Amino acid sequence: MTIDEIQQEIIDDFAGFEDWMDKYSLLIELGNEMAPIDVQYKVDENLIRGCQSRVWLHQEYLDGTITFEAESDALIVKGLVALLLKIYSGRTPHEILASEPRFIDEIGLRQHLSPTRSNGLLAMVKQMKLYALAYEKISTKNN
Amino acid sequence: MVYLDNAATSQRPVQVIERMNEFSLKTNGNIHRATHTFANKTTEAFEQAREIVRSYLNATESAEVIFTSGTTESINLVAHSFGDAFIHEGDEVIVTEMEHHANIVPWQMMCERIGAKLKVIPFNEKGELSMDALDSLITDKTKIIAVTHVSNVLGTVNCVATIIEKAHLKNIPVLIDGAQGAPHFPIDVQALDCDFYTFSGHKIYGPTGSGVLYGKRKWLDQMPPFLGGGEMIDRVTFGKTTFNEIPYKFEAGTPNYVGAIGLGAAIEYIQSYDHSFVLKHEQDLLQFATEKLKSINGLTIYGEANKKAGVLSFNIEGIHPFDLGTLLDQLGIAVRTGRLCADPVMDHFSVENMARSSFAFYNTLEEVEVFYQALIRLKTMF
């Protein structure tokens, strides 16, 4: 599936809920189900600090794709992090750079990506893109 | 919206908004400068606001009331100017463990600049300051003590009168950060005998960007200006500038006079209510909320001092305050979550964040009940 197809799938999953609280319940469920980040990666170098909640992000680049692992101390943020990983992990730098996380806007959770929200999510998306940019440059150089 | 974030900022009554609007629409002119009618009327309204504040604080004279942009500027002004005049290398400044960052950082900056030392009065598990510790912290080198009237996290009403009394035995002046105090009870600076008292307009039903520094004349007269510019001068030549009298010496540039006028209206609004009724109502809200929240399994309340004002901070086991705040907002309830501008308090309890509900006298017991029911509902989601 392409990044866009996965995003559409997520949008469709959320469209089924009319009540706001059900959307959040699903995010909490996703957060609870998410595998925790490996302890060795839950360190300050991987910490993206928001005023309200924290996100840890670790990445590995292998065979042209970037694998991300991440976690947040807040469950709603963790649920959103799980969705971001579903979309961006295991993709090539080019795919990551070419795609915006439009699903967050479309499922009506845009406020979580606003700079004022300070939950670390916006910084996490930026950080993933920065990694992608760095690896894209490296691979162009090597080629 | 059930608004329970009053310790962050309070809602403004229509009387305040109308006073500011009417002023802006009909009489705007810069103060203390020109001879035209608008300027004169503005000056009059501004000075009248100063008199309202003087009377609210029961200060001896209105020259002891300086308009600032808020508590943060007020404390920075004192830390800077008092520091310049009276604090030297090796001297000591005392604050408390429960201060808002605004009553820590300005002192820290000044201490670093001058080479002075910052000392801290700790609080106990109930959230009450240790007076014994204060006794041992005061030395011959102590030059000023800065303490909050009411903790913005714990709600503790500090025994500032005792602290002032102890400090004055050694001729040490005391600054009271009244940002969370002035909104809850009337202040009598003469009875308290505090040397400085600060508060913000926007937490006391007034506009943002307005605030007050009260200071005793004997200190203010000796302190150098904080900012330089217009209004604060007596005579300027390139060789030397002499400065204006207080309060103008500390009000450089065009002040936020619309804000000051709004703040005056806010204080008149508060004064139009029976004070004992307001105090009792706020205590009823706090007591009811405390009882309700205590009945929730896994809920911890931070700060259980014997004397508290309308602030109730808490955590629910297994629920991150960010999630709690987000979901309460979905249910139409506004609370504050995060580190509450008080990192040392977070560290004291070894938590990253807290949720805080804070009450104003326009809140109702029904709203507290709605808040409680929402917490019960949210608990089932985790």
Image (tube, rainbow, N blue to C red):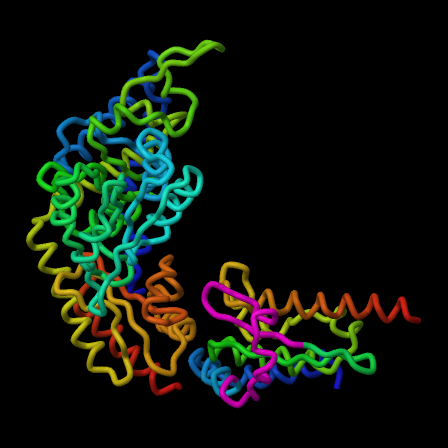
Q: What residue appears at the point 38 percent right and 80 percent down from the top-left corner? A: B319
Q: Is residue B188 left or right of residue B263?
A: left
Q: Is B32 rendered above or below residue A51?
A: above
Front residue of B182/B19: it is: B182
Residue A68 in which image quadrant: bottom right
Q: Is residue A95 left or right of residue B194?
A: right
Front residue of B267/A17: it is: B267
Question: Looking at the figure, which quarter contains the N terminus of chain B?
Answer: bottom left
Q: What residue appears at the point 39 percent right and 86 percent down from the top-left corner? A: B381
Could you say where residue A106 lies in the image, as x and y percent from the top left?
Answer: 59, 73
Q: Is B379 rendered above or below residue B244?
A: below
Q: Is residue B209 visible?
A: no
Could you say where residue A37 lies in the image, as x and y percent from the top left?
Answer: 58, 83
Could you say where residue A135 lies in the image, as x and y percent from the top left?
Answer: 79, 70
| B118 inside magenta stretch | no
Q: What residue appears at the point 34 percent right and 21 percent down from the top-left corner? A: B31
Q: Can residue A130 be seen in this view?
A: yes
Residue A89 in which image quadrant: bottom right
Q: Is B275 rendered above or below residue A100?
A: above
State the extent of the magenta-drawn residues as a range. Answer: A31-58
Question: Looking at the figure, which quarter contains the C terminus of chain B?
Answer: bottom left
Q: Is A34 rendered above or below residue B11?
A: below
